Image (cartoon, rainbow, N blue to C red):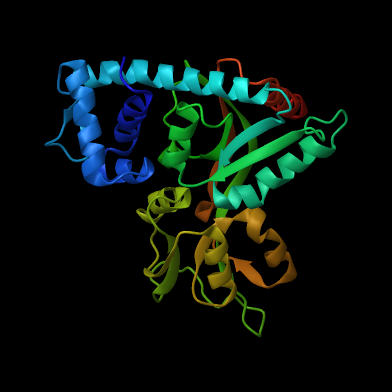
Amino acid sequence: MADLKLLEDLIALARTGSFVRAAELRHVTHPAFGRRIRALEVWAGAPLVERQHLPVTLTPEGEALLKTATQVVEQMGLVRHRIRSSGAGGEAVLRIATGRSLARTLVADWIARLRHRTPKVLTEGTQVELSTGKAQDLVVRLEQGKVDLLCCYEHPALSVPLSPARYRYMTLATDKLVPVSQVDTRGRARYTLQDGGPPVPLITYTGGLAMERIVGDRLETTPYALTPFVRSDSLDAAHGAVAKGVGVAWLPWSMVAADCRRGVLAALGGRSEEIAFEVRLYRPRARLTDLAEAAWEATANRKA
């Protein structure tokens, strides 16, 4: 039987398509990660990786092993968590993976509801373990059974690659990205979006952030002259840059609605400039811990 960590390595490589990125995800050096993949190939008795392709792809043998590896790692993670959660004197832990901005907003509100609702789901004898990061890394954590639930954005440009046969989801919220600008002393938007108008400084997002792919998909067809000026790995930082008058950014309406109502920021363009998206909560179809199941059911009942 291959070492469990080698199966986790294969999952990370398949998810990232890069030896370098997978090594970072697995917290090992690039050479060490390569040796571990080769060790797995020796155990399997066949090449598992098409190394000449970029991004890296798996051979048919690698794909076959990946399918089983994903199931094994997920089940082992669930069993381990159940054992730890039911140990003598141990507190039940709800493990949630999400993005940084969601952790501060929607997920924080959701946790508060689970804590204060009647009957309570998060009682005095429970804990919440919240982990944040890039979407692809969080998906791997869910597949490896290291978290119970994944809360993330969903958009056609950013579909979460989880098999419907093994995972299910519910929609927690719908939102939209809107282009916004600082308002000047006369109460007018500092920048405007005009077809054929002057170039406008753009605040956008770095690779790996969910919003980078969602906004990038829209910018490919925009008729406006937008000049990239600031690239940020944080929605909060982009929001702050807009508030300082640095440029225009597409930001979640839930984040900027209050500022627009107060006249601090102004939404630009019409409905055609808005980008609708969902916030989804994913879970394995396999049975979770009692606490995770209770959190899921309480949330599903509230949505019904």
Please identify the quarter of the rendering in which residue 156 is found: top left
In this view, the residue farthest toward the front is: 88
Could you say which is closer to the camera, residue 255 or residue 56? 56
Could you say which is closer to the camera, residue 30 or residue 156? 30
Quadrant of the image containing the C terminus: top right
In this view, the residue farthest toward the right is: 118
Please identify the quarter of the rendering in which residue 45 is found: top left
Could you say which is closer to the camera, residue 264 or residue 123? 123
Tell me if I can see residue 284 in this picture. Answer: no
Q: At 77% from the left edge and 29% from the top edge, which residue is drawn?
A: 302
Q: Position of residue 293 (x, y in %)?
A: 68, 21
Q: At 54% from the left edge and 42% from the top edge, which residue is drawn?
A: 277
Instruction: Name above or below for residue 155 compared with residue 82.
Output: below
- Is residue 31 toward the left or the right of residue 118 in the image? left
Q: Position of residue 271 (x, y in %)?
A: 56, 53
Q: Position of residue 188 (x, y in %)?
A: 62, 78
Q: Position of residue 82 (x, y in %)?
A: 61, 20
Please identify the quarter of the rendering in which residue 95 is found: top right
Quadrant of the image containing the N terminus: top left
In this view, the residue farthest toward the left is: 52
Tell me if I can see residue 159 in this picture. Answer: yes
